[in-house]
């Protein structure tokens, strides 16, 4: 009896043909990390369960029949590929529903359907895994294989149903051509720039990045350059020079905040070409008129979002890091295209402390087993290579690209720091009123709102926080820049949303006491242009709004630096190193809050290897409070939002519409969502909307929970 994998009007796809094609594609993907045979075995086994009568009836139109067709290949792998077959079994069992935990895998094996044994292929001999499978290595190896299978299965199935699609997929990477474009753009910028000391230092940073990128093979690097030193383009120059010299496959830029990603991607598109840069995060959409992307390139970039098959990928830390620990096929599909990449980890100091151990374990494994080069890019370099304080979790052999970061910091120093001690909101508001142009950064949304209300009558006052939609914040940031550039009064009260990647230049910055890295990042919004006089950064202890408990230790360590030996310049690399060393020492037992590494440590049992994939994926969450996203708009955006919501109400649920709405979405924490429940309504199937009455045109969502 013939067996089929898929069916469409006028054509059935033979099962053996589908298995062979998925095996071929999966093998090609696996070759990138010397695992082609393992990946091929997955492709040959993945749909064996379709060779049963029930599935063939379902394919014929009987939708009432359910068949767990993924578990048959897992059974064959565990039966005939001992002892490593279990590693394949997880990927095979999970290629539709996600990587299971051992208990769930066992349950499904016991209930597997009967299938035609003649379909079982001759399986290759696997040998030992080609990577280090101790610790996190085993689970990441399974995820990489899983990625090969999932992507191959999707592409092969797509080719059957949509034969026009394969030619739209994949953007070739030519590092030499892109480097030439980048250097040409940088040369234009340097010729236009005034011959100042700052610009000479930027040229030095660029030259050093090119030298080290070409001269050193892959590994772990750090790029420690103060704010305004040209890190964004210099780090890309390193990446492209390194990729050209050492045959890397793509460049992946990872940043913590959407605001940084949007700005960085825009810079890279301008320099490298709009069709070369994939910007992958929830708020982005490829519109017909954005950066000259034509319809064909737009489709190619949309498709590349699914598996990162693009020369330059700009993405969030949440997307990148959570994918390395994910269980769902859609999140893991891209992983095999991380192999052999240059990864620029921007603002590396923001790696979450409670998940630092698994994050560093994943970075070590990418370098050790998957031919990646990783660059930690920041003005406030954390002490991630310090074995004295991080022990076995430390990153080994990190090479600093700049010869002397301390001298570079001194040469680019633009601010002086003032520790003002305790300050209530009245005192803070008086200081804001006394400075015509000032940025005040505080720790919480509630404090930002309260301090703004104190200052609401001041000329040029504005508010910035994550309770405003991305579109609203972007409009305010542009207005702030315009005021600053034209010398008008400009006073801004903000949360940490302005600390990284937001190009603002104030003569005076006030910062509520927080971690030292946050204070130094806020200082990066002060005197960015390097005027003749130092900018002034005032750090104060807010009395009306205590430091949140989760940051109290960070703040205490920062205060020690501000009152101690680093008081004159707490932004020095030595000060930051001492700060991070103390921070890691104080949290030595809390660097893996969800026991992720324990759950993913292989447990050997007779004939199998067990790991808790699904449980670890649930535990590894960079954003602990999930909350909900609600669409909300200030008056200038309301007409656009109304048009989009009309499409949602009419039943549209496509990706483009949801992306467009995310530009107007605010993430509410669970407590905030509960407090505002009466003002939130569903529109269509997948959209929640906040009433206009509780969205303030100046401050965003009208809630002040502490």
Image: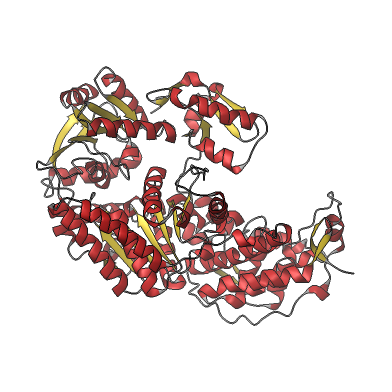
**Residue 452 image-quadrant placement:** top left
> Residue 492 in the image: x percent, y percent?
27, 29
> Residue 69 in the image: x percent, y percent?
76, 61
Q: Is residue 693 left or right of residue 241?
A: right
Is residue 110 visible to us here? yes
Q: In this view, does 149 lie to the left or right of 281?
A: right
Query: In the image, what residue occupies the spot 35% across and 54% down?
Result: 346
> Residue 564 in the image: x percent, y percent?
12, 46
**Image height check: is 229 above or below 372?**
above
Query: In the image, what residue occupies the spot 27% across and 65% down?
Result: 209
In what quadrant of the picture does the C terminus appear? top left
In what quadrant of the picture does the N terminus appear? bottom right
Q: Residue furthest right?
A: 1
> Observer-nearest residue: 543 or 266?
266
* Numbered circles on residues, count: 0
**Residue 225 image-quadrant placement:** bottom left
**Image height check: is 225 above or below 678?**
below
What's the colour scheme? secondary structure
Q: Is residue 162 left or right of residue 344?
A: right
> Residue 384 in the image: x percent, y percent?
31, 60
> Observer-nearest residue: 84 or 589?
84
Is residue 401 visible to us here? no
> Observer-nearest residue: 481 or 592?
481
């Amino acid at each position: 009896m013939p067996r089929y994998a898929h069916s469409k009007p006028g054509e059935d796809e033979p099962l053996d043909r589908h298995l062979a094609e998925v095996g071929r594609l999966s093998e090609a993907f696996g070759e990138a990390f010397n695992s082609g045979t393992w990946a091929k075995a997955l492709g040959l086994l993945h749909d064996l369960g379709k060779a049963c009568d029930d599935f063939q009836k379902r394919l014929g139109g009987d939708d009432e029949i359910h068949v767990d067709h993924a578990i048959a290949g897992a059974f064959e792998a565990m039966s005939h590929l001992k002892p490593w077959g279990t590693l394949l079994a997880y990927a095979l069992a999970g290629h539709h529903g996600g990587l299971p935990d051992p208990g769930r895998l066992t349950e499904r094996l016991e209930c597997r359907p009967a299938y035609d044994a003649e379909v079982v292929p001759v399986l290759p001999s696997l040998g030992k895994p080609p990577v280090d499978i101790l610790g996190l290595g085993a689970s990441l190896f399974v995820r990489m294989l899983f990625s090969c299978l999932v992507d191959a299965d999707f592409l092969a199935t797509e080719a059957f149903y949509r034969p026009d699609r394969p030619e739209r997929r994949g953007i070739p990477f030519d590092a030499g051509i892109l480097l030439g474009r980048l250097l040409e753009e940088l040369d234009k910028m340097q010729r236009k720039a005034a011959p100042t000391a700052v610009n000479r230092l930027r040229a030095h940073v660029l030259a050093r990045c090119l030298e080290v990128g070409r001269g050193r093979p892959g590994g772990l690097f750090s790029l420690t350059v103060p704010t305004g030193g040209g890190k964004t383009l210099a780090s890309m120059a390193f990446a492209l020079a390194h990729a050209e010299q050492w045959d890397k496959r793509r460049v992946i830029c990872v940043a913590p905040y959407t605001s940084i990603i949007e700005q960085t991607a825009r810079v890279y598109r301008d320099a490298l070409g709009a069709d070369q840069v994939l910007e992958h995060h929830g708020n982005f959409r490829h519109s017909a008129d954005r950066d000259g992307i034509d319809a064909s390139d737009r489709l190619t970039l949309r498709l590349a979002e699914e598996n990162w098959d693009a020369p330059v990928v700009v993405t969030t830390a949440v997307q990148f890091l959570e994918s390395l620990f994910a269980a769902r096929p859609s999140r893991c599909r891209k992983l095999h295209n991380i192999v052999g990449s240059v990864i620029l980890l921007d603002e590396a100091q923001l790696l979450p402390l409670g998940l630092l151990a698994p994050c560093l374990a994943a970075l070590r494994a990418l370098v050790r087993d998957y031919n990646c080069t990783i660059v930690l890019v920041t003005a406030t370099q954390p002490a991630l290579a310090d074995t004295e304080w991080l022990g076995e979790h430390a990153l080994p052999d990190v090479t600093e690209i700049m010869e002397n970061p301390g001298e570079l910091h001194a040469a680019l120093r633009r601010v002086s720091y003032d520790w003002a001690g305790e300050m209530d909101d009245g005192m803070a508001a008086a200081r804001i009123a006394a400075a015509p142009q000032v940025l005040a950064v505080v720790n919480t949304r509630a404090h930002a709102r309260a301090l703004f209300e104190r200052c609401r009558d001041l000329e040029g006052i504005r508010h910035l926080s994550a309770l405003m939609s991305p579109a609203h914040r972007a409009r305010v940031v542009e207005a702030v820049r315009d005021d600053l550039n034209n010398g008008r009064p400009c006073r801004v009260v903000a949360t940490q949303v302005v600390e990284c990647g937001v190009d603002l230049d104030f003569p005076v910055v006030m910062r509520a006491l927080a971690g030292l890295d946050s204070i130094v990042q806020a200082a990066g919004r002060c005197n960015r242009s390097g005027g003749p006089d130092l900018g002034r950064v005032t750090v104060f202890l807010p009395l009306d709004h205590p430091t949140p408990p989760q940051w109290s230790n960070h703040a205490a360590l920062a205060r020690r630096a501000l009152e101690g030996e680093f008081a004159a310049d707490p932004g020095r690399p030595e000060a930051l190193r001492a700060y991070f060393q103390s921070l890691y020492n104080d949290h030595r037992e809390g660097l893996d809050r969800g026991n992720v590494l324990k759950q993913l440590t292989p447990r050997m049992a007779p004939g199998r290897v067990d790991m808790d994939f699904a449980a670890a994926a649930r535990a590894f969450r960079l954003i602990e409070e999930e909350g909900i996203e609600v669409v909300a708009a200030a008056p200038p955006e309301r007409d656009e939002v109304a048009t989009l919501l009309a499409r949602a109400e009419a039943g549209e649920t496509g990706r483009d519409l949801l992306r467009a709405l995310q530009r107007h979405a605010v993430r509410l924490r669970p407590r905030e969502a509960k407090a505002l429940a009466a003002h939130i309504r569903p529109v269509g199937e997948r959209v929640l909307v906040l009433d206009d009455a509780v969205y303030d045109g100046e401050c965003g969502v009208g809630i002040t929970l502490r």
